[in-house]
Amino acid sequence: MQEKPSTPQKILIVRMTAIGDVAHVLPALNALRLAMPDARIDWLVDEIPAQILMGHPQINHLQVLRRRWRKEFRRHFFSEIRPFFRRLRAERYDWAIDFQGLTKSGLAAYFSGATRIIGFGDRDGRELNKLFTNVKVRPRPGLHIVEKNISLLAPLGIENPPIQFVFPDFEADKVSFDDSGFYAAVNPGAGWQTKRLPVSTLAALCARLNTQKGMRIVITWGPGEEELSKDLLQKIAKAGANAEMSPPTTLRQLARLISRAGLFIGGDTGPSHIAAALGIPTISFFGASDAKRNRPYGEHCNTIQNTEIPCIPCWKTRCRFKDARHLACLNSITAGDLYDSALRLLESKCAK
């Protein structure tokens, strides 16, 4: 048996983006804090996902890096980037844990000056990442990314801990919106074209849930998604059903709104992963990404992906086909598939 390493005093978590991926690291943070209650645990993160970590009871300090720092490296190196990493290096971290596995995260971990840098030794250590890690972990194949993340704690003597998501308190982030009673939160947006279900499919689903089951439908949206959400709202109305759009929200306000929902429906995107982690019954649909690896992780989750499509998972942000195969991964998912999955999920939750 490998000897347990001495307990580090200062640990830096490196997971800078994106919202759902940051949420997937929370069980590893929880396991780390339970095993090392007196250690200082900081988190290096970009400014947008940092919102859901502010005030987290298990984090000592957030090291917030300005968005797009790598793409603007030359322009802002002397004014912002070098001073930031000098301050980070002055913390003298014992260990850095790179949960992101990219060149940018490897560089950030290296610039932190941590004595030891844990990272993925398998294909989750992508690009030039392996050049910057000196403790490499090769997780067992077939694991969900939440479980892969936890496997990075093995060099610290932490193995097979219970999986638990801990969030900061979002109670103070209430938005002007009636979040009482049961409602289904439906999120049509996603950063990739290959993660967005056709609006017509979502509209048909929402219409059935509203007219046949009497569900209140609330369309959630983020920056750049307002027109998409309005299009969904109009199509639901044309189908003879009722729905409403949530007001503009911060990420924390959106998390609070999601936490009050009785059902959440969305793709492989941050709000879906937050919903599942908060224990909300979640229906997710997957296109280009791998549902086995990336599906929302929680007790009450159903994920739909048409695995008969031969190019799944392609991990492309846009579909490369221009013919009948264009977005077949998403176009083949029907409103009926989602409707039946939602009813089964809610029935199974009630049975428990």
Image: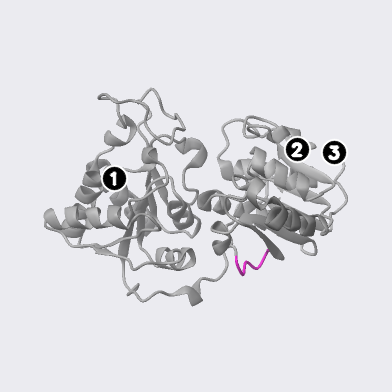
Residue drawn 80% across and 64% down?
A: 38
Pick the quarter of the image with the C terminus: bottom left
Pick the quarter of the image with the N terminus: top right
56 inside magenta stretch = yes
Asked whether residue 304 is in view, the answer is no
179 inside magenta stretch = no
Q: What amino acid is labelled 2 in the image?
A: Phe
Q: Earlier in the sequence, mark 1 or mark 3?
A: 3
Q: What amino acid is labelled 1 in the image?
A: Leu
* Residue behind mark 1: 338
Mark 2 neighbour density, 10 Å: few (under 14) some (14–19) many (20 or more): many
| For residue 291, side relative to residue 200 (left or right) | right
Mark 1 neighbour density, 10 Å: few (under 14) some (14–19) many (20 or more): many
- Give the answer, above or below, for where 202 lies relative to 2: below
Q: Quadrant of residue 168?
A: bottom right
- What SS does tag 1 mark? helix
Distance from Cα at disc 2 to Cα at disc 1: 43 Å
